[in-house]
Image (cartoon, helix red, strand yellow):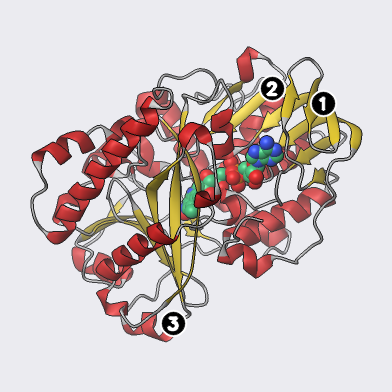
Amino acid sequence: MAHRSFWLQEVLGDAPDEAPLQGAQRADVAIVGGGFVGLWTALRIKERDPGCDVVLVEQDICGGGASGRNGGEVLSWWAKAGTLVALCGREEAIRLATASVDAIGEIEVFCSEHGIDAEFNRAGYLWTATTAAQLGAWDSTVELLRDLGAPALELLEPAEVARRAGSPVHLAGVLDPSAATVQPAKLARGLRRVALERGVRIHEHSRVTSVDRGRPAVLRTAHGALTADRVVFATNAWAASMRELHTRLVVVSSDIILTAEAPERLDEIGWTGFEAISDSQVMIHYYRRTARGRVMFGKGGWGIALAGRLGPDFDRHEGRAVDVEANFRRIYPNLADVPVEHHWCGPIDRSHHGLPLFGRLGGREHLVYGVGWSGNGVGPSVLGGKILASLALGADDEWSRSSFVGDRPGRFPPDPVRFVGAHVVRSAVVRMERAHARGSSPRPWDVFVAGFAPAGIIPKAGRDGKE
Ligand SMILES: Cc1cc2nc3c(=O)[nH]c(=O)nc-3n(C[C@H](O)[C@H](O)[C@H](O)COP(=O)(O)OP(=O)(O)OC[C@H]3O[C@@H](n4cnc5c(N)ncnc54)[C@H](O)[C@@H]3O)c2cc1C
């Protein structure tokens, strides 16, 4: 069994696992993947068409993937305004970014209506610089937002950024007040419970091993076959092994460490708020304090998967955790005495532009997908559920017509070229960012090669905020 994140360990045993798919079954809509995207989609379909027979199949348990392992930073798309405008135009960019803020409110309302204690806390997103090289990473976004008439990022005084983030290593930053934090596994398991209550049939421990793409489609698992009129693929990084999506996604790891509970130490250094925080590295660091006074500190982009194959290195990796802790110690020298108690990791489905992709597999109307969350899926998956529900129900509305749907530009080279190239670029990024952290100048060659990262080989903050 996969190593479980601390978040999942906190909630495991909350409900018995749902039985695997057995024998021949039928559904109006089959959903593959029981993470945030699959579960929100199931709930939206039931909301819009309560009579629709929805069956969700999950290879592990619901929430066992990225949704139960992530940093719990619930972010809007305002920090991605530049990419949104480039992809969709100004008007649609504002509409989608506004919808991404509404989605955060929808999570809060959903949790309170259904008694889900997901530790939702809306304290904003602090986008910071922890080295001189990162200063001003947000400048063009702030300017663009002003120009769009949507000044969503507030410039804070440097001292205020350092105070809120709890360490003088923070040199400057901006705040997006719309963001929140959650205990993600509690949210995922809450969604699962409500989906079951609404009549969604869930089969866990049911890996889909083959798909007959005819109409109806047939999904096969070890012990069963599910015939469905329409299928939604909400399989995150695992989708990179599908032939249509292979060059649309690059799969990298995100690695997390979690300290012991130390609320009094955090209070002492002035880290009393619950902002979701990140720096502006290419291989970004993201962090926050939890409700019980632990520090969650994560880093994106270390591990790279070949041909979308996800082994145990994408559940837990000792070597990468050591590096993540070293970076935590650099940014928080004032917490040197607080031990790290847990670490785990998970896969990120990085798209070329860092925003999700929706479409129809091989152009087939009845096979739809929503992947490519690029490390920012906790809040946006609410919108993903709306888009995928509209596509699965064949609706013609603002969601099915969203600019995200359809073939968009941006592909990676196929493996093994991508795998080798990603390693070369990542090594250059690592050397460059270590030099920045030491306060020295990186080698020009490393800066040159690292410059290929924005093309999407590694999750990138830069001018687009946390991914
Ligand atoms: C360590 C880490 C930190 C992150 N931090 C943040 C953060 O702070 N904020 C943020 O917004 N985002 C963050 N993310 C990203 C976020 O978690 C994801 O974007 C989001 O959870 C995507 O939801 P999903 O439903 O697409 O994916 P998942 O939760 O991974 O769900 C996909 C599911 O599909 C299942 N599946 C795959 N193949 C099959 C198959 N063949 N048959 C059956 N089931 C299958 C998998 O088991 C999995 O459960 C982070 C991700 C990781 C890994």
The crowding category of the residue bearing disc 2, from other C-alpha atoms within 10 Å (few below 14, some 14 to 19, many at least 20), is: many
Q: Is residue 328 above or below residue 427?
A: below
The first of marks 2 and 3 along the sequence is: 3
Quadrant of the image containing the C terminus: top left
Marks 1 and 3, how far apart at CA: 50 Å
On whether ligand 1 comes within 8 Å of the CB at mark 2, the answer is no
Q: Is residue 115 above or below residue 66?
A: below
Horizontal side, residue 301 vs residue 132: left or right: right
Disc 3 secondary structure class: loop
Q: CB of mark 2 within 8 Å of CB of mark 1?
A: no
Give the residue type at disc 2: Leu
Residue closer to the observer: 301 or 131: 301
Residue 335 pos. (x, y %): 32, 78
Q: Is residue 103 visible?
A: no
| Nearest the eye: 322 or 462 | 322
The residue lying at 26 percent from left, 65 percent from top is 161
Q: Is residue 283 visible?
A: yes
Residue depicted at x 86% and y 35%: 224
Type of amino acid under label 3: Ala
Is 277 or 328 nearer to us in this picture? 328
Residue 72 in the image: above or below residue 96: below
Q: Secondary structure at mark 2?
A: strand
Q: Which residue is mark 1?
A: 228
Residue type at tag 1: Ala
Percent from the top left, x then y, of residue 26? 89, 30
Residue that label 3 marks:
262
On whether ligand 1 comes within 8 Å of the CB at mark 1, the answer is no
The residue under label 2 is 367
**Which image quarter holds the N terminus?**
bottom right
